[in-house]
Amino acid sequence: MKHRESVVGLLLAGLLVPLAHAADSDAPLRFEAAPGVRVQAEVTEDGSIDVQLLPSGRRLSLPGAPDADGNSRLSAEDVDFDGRPELVARASVGMVNEAVAVYRFDPASGGFRALQAETHGHDNCGGLMGLTVDAATRTLTSSCRSGPMWYTDQYRFEGTKLYLYRSEDVLRLGDALDAALQWEQTDEQGPLAVWRTHDASGHVLESAIADGLSAPASGEPLRGQQATVASARLFLFDRPGAPSTTRYLVQGDRVEMLDEQDGWMKLRYRNPKHGAIEGWINVND
């Protein structure tokens, strides 16, 4: 799958943040969480993480990310790009998914806090599943599989706040869309999805409809799937649900697919005389 291949490519190119240290099955994980604060961590029999802070000797117990057998794999990774590693626990879930828990050291309390993201309910994976860390774009990518479909959520930081930066919604318009528009689809391409870029407040900054299995490059503008109008006349409305319009596209017009709401699809048509024109078509009409 394309987004899986892109992750492998980043690993080979050295763009993903390397592990500061990963614990093997027998040895505890050791790393420095802050200047003068050393950490020793290991997974206990009940799946929790036993943490000892040195030189104070303080002990903590963290939930971890246990699999069905109560196992977690521990590593130290700079997840928030501040130059210091976080405590990361990973565990297999089902056949292909990986649950991930990230704990940041808090100097004020002298303990660890779980890293949680503000998603405004728009994420697909429900957490940092299959986490990869891209230092070049300062982006965290979460990937998960549900049924036959792989989903991707991307996160960024605003200050110390982690927020959902980019998400996808798979299109489910069926044959009605095929009757209105035609586009080229390769054997490697998955179902179409609406990709949306969000700000830290959850507002949508841009959207585009593209391959749901290939996450757009982080930091670059979204680009929509190109299509051709299939019907003789395709009416173009100002907004979803608008009662009437005088604008329309004709068979053969080239458009870019941008968004979808309740069976309405947003298109961009580049008029040779008037430039880019945007509007909504009623796919189910």
Image (cartoon, grey):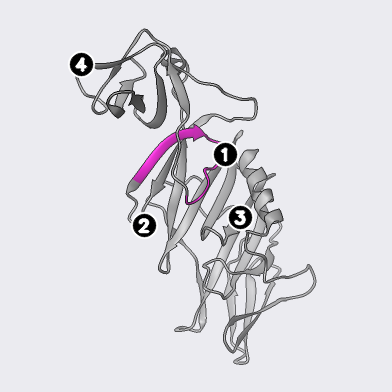
Amino acid type of the residue that numbered disc 1 sits on in the rendered structure = Ser
Gap in angstroms between the C-alphas marked 4 and 3: 51 Å
Closer to the N terminus: mark 4 or mark 1?
Answer: 1
Count the marks: how many?
4
Foreground: 222 or 36?
A: 222
Foreground: 137 or 39?
A: 137
Closer to the N terminus: mark 4 or mark 2?
Answer: 2
Amino acid type of the residue that numbered disc 3 sits on in the rendered structure = Ala
- Where 284 sits versus 25, above or below? above
Gap in angstroms between the C-alphas marked 1 and 3: 21 Å
Q: What label does residue 200 carry, if any?
A: 2
What element does badge 3 sit on? strand
Closer to the N terminus: mark 3 or mark 2?
Answer: 3
Q: What label does residue 214 carry, if any?
A: 1
Within 10 angstroms of label 2, few (less than 14), some, or many (20 or more) residues?
some
Point 57% across, 86% down: residue: 35
- Tag 4–tag 3 contact (CB < 8 Å): no
Closer to the N terminus: mark 1 or mark 3?
Answer: 3
Closer to the N terminus: mark 4 or mark 3?
Answer: 3
Point 66% across, 79% down: residue: 31
Residue 217 part of the magenta-drawn span: yes
Q: Using the rendered view, name the quadrant where residue 236 is placed.
A: top left
Amino acid type of the residue that numbered disc 4 sits on in the rendered structure = Thr
Q: Mark 4 highlights which residue?
A: 246
Quadrant of the drawing holding the C terminus: top left
Gap in angstroms between the C-alphas marked 2 and 1: 23 Å
Q: Using the rendered view, name the quadrant where residue 184 is placed.
A: top right
- Tag 4–tag 1 contact (CB < 8 Å): no
Point 68% across, 55% down: residue: 13
Magenta stretch, residue numbers:
205-219
Within 10 angstroms of label 4, few (less than 14), some, or many (20 or more) residues?
few
What element does badge 4 sit on? loop
